[in-house]
Image: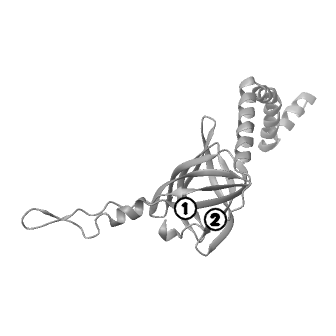
Amino acid sequence: MTHRRRRHAAVARRPIHVVAAGIAIVGMVLGAPAVSWAADRPEARDAADETARRQKHFRDLVTDVTLVGRFTIDRPPAPAAATQPDGEAQPRKDAGAGDAADLALREEEYAITGAVPLGGDLWALTARIRYGETDVTIPVPIAVKWAGDTPVLTLDRITLPGLGTFSSRVVLDGDRYAGTWQHDDVGGHMFGRIERRATSTGPASPRPADR
């Protein structure tokens, strides 16, 4: 067997994974300039700069602040009035009482110490949650969506141990916030102001049963 034939035979006897590894390395070397070029494109740099700017803006907005405001409670629609034999509607005895209570504004307060990005739209928002005898500070996983330059805090059926399941959409606009909330089967609207570097001294938020 000639020298050239021995070399071809040795290559043929090499395990397939060794050949595949060699092909992969060659592909990485040839593809590296293309990846680097894509990352250096103006569009990629602009997107990275915009992401960094938004992250800084949001972190500054929710660091050492307290959301102080009011919220409402939406109740399920009242059952239809009963009909008397003569065809006239019989008024409910509680007509208007529950509706007036639900429309009353209740105080709320959320102390936020800061936020940590988790990747993509996800953040861990460290907040002090107080209502009734409960007073805990926990990281709340949220998604931050953007309406232009305005962040929108988004919760989608997030369960907090010992507290319940929450959903919300809350807009943070300058020194004001507004949005909707859902706690288990009860929900409503919420709005108020954002106080920076404030320490909570007001009344505790109501129990979940009241929300």
Outermost residue to the bottom: 133
13, 74: nearer the viewer: 74
Residue sitting at x 61%, y 56%: 68
In the rendered image, residue 107, in percent from the top left (x then y), is placed at 55, 61
The quarter of the displayed image where residue 138 is located: bottom right
Q: Residue 107 carries which label?
A: 1
Residue 25, compared with residue 37, is above or below; it is: below
Question: In this figure, what is the number of numbered marks?
Answer: 2
Whether 97 is drawn above or below 31: the answer is below
Q: In this view, does 27 lie above or below 112?
A: above
In contact (CB < 8 Å): disc 1 and disc 2: yes
- Residue furthest right as drawn: 3
Judge left or right: residue 39 versus residue 170: right
Q: Which mark is residue 202?
A: 2
Dot 1, how many residues are within 10 Å of its Cα: few (below 14), some (14-19), or many (20+)? Answer: some
Instruction: Name the spot of residue 96 as percent of width and height, x first.
Output: 31, 63
Residue 22, by quadrant, is top right
Closer-to-camera residue (207/117): 207
- Quarter holding the N terminus? top right
Residue 204, how many percent across, how many down? Answer: 60, 68
Circle 2: residue type: Gly
